[in-house]
Image (tube, helix red, strand yellow):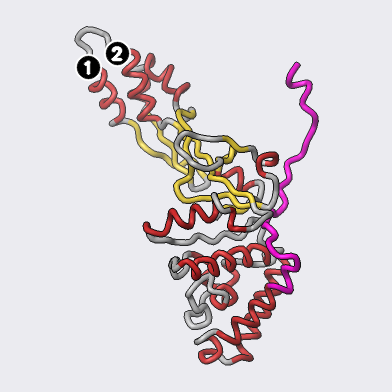
Amino acid sequence: RMADMVEPFELDKSTKYPHIYADPEKTFETKIEEAIASHPYAVKRHGEERLRQVVSEEVEVYKATKSIDFMLLQTYLREWEKTQGIQSGYGRGSVSGSMVAYLLGITQMDSLAFNLNFFRFMNPSRVTNADIDTDYSGKDRDAVKQFLLRDKMNLPNIQSAEIITFNTTAMKGAVRDVCRALYKDRDGTNYLQIADGICKEVSQEDAGNGQKKWVASERVRKAYPDVFKYVDIVDGTVVSIGTHPSGVLISDLPIEQTVGLCSLSTSDYPVSMIDMKELDDLMYVKL
């Protein structure tokens, strides 16, 4: 009866970069112009004509991929960091190929000087969200986290949450749990010895798509059918929930309705009810 009451619906998988400026395109171009005029190295190293040519090409790609809002979000965060004396890493991953990111202070990597490839980071055929990972020292992490989660970046339209993790049991853990349940109270039986013996014949194999899976040998399966009867049920099941150690969901949408929020005893902030991979699939921004 409950299933029959569910109305048809479609998941919104469109890009969800948060809007933080009324006119993103104009704000983006203004910030770039100001950066070209004030940057201590860029024009001296590459000449204004070459610099503007590269920047113009990148901006057209940002427009085509509708990712200007995302770059402005990152710029806003860097501007706040400077006011707080917080330092971030020089630049991680493919974003270091963007000259615009260098000019705006998102990275400290001069992509022209090192001949880095912008299109690894952003290109018109990209179907996933832009992604920029940032490194912070231990002393600054809590301040950044509070700014994102407690202060909502000091922006009236921004909502944020920690990202839930579903912790599952792996095969070796399942073997130990099942052996404890089956053998612990049997006289003369050392369940740890049995579990360790089985685990020695559990190894990782390629599961495709770059993934690995744990597999038990046929010999040990035949030797302990009573164990694997339950291991195959327990293996991969969710045993606890937690929060992503370094990821934050940022949105200008009502995430308590679109994503769902919960609270955990281990977190001081709201926590999303879907995990990182599902947020990626729905095209939400995670910092």
> Can see residue 125?
no
Q: Tell me if mark 1 has few (under 14), some (14-19) or many (20+) residues whose alpha carbon lies within 10 angstroms of its own.
A: some
Marks 2/1: CA–CA distance:
7 Å
Could you say where residue 234 lies in the image, as x and y percent from the top left? 45, 23
Q: Quadrant of residue 229?
A: top left
Looking at the rendered structure, the number of numbered marks drawn on it comes to: 2
> In the rendered image, is residue 237 in sight?
yes
**Magenta highlight on residue 12:** yes
Q: Residue at x 61, y 63 (%)?
A: 73
* Marked residue nearer the N-terminal end (2 or 1): 2
Could you tell me which quadrant the C terminus lies in? Answer: bottom right
Q: Amino acid at mark 1?
A: Asn
Question: Which part of the image, by quadrant, shows the N terminus?
Answer: top right
Residue 183 tag number: 2
State yes or no: discs 2 and 1 in contact (Cβ < 8 Å).
Answer: yes
Please state the extent of the stretch shown in magenta in the rendering: 1-27
Q: Is residue 71 above or below residue 42?
A: above
Q: Residue furthest left?
A: 188
* Residue 124 percent coordinates (x, y): 69, 66
- Residue situated in front as seen by the camera: 71 or 76: 76
Where 84 falls versus 176 (above or below)? Answer: below
Image-based side of 193 in relation to 179, left or right? left
The verdict on residue 123 being magenta is no
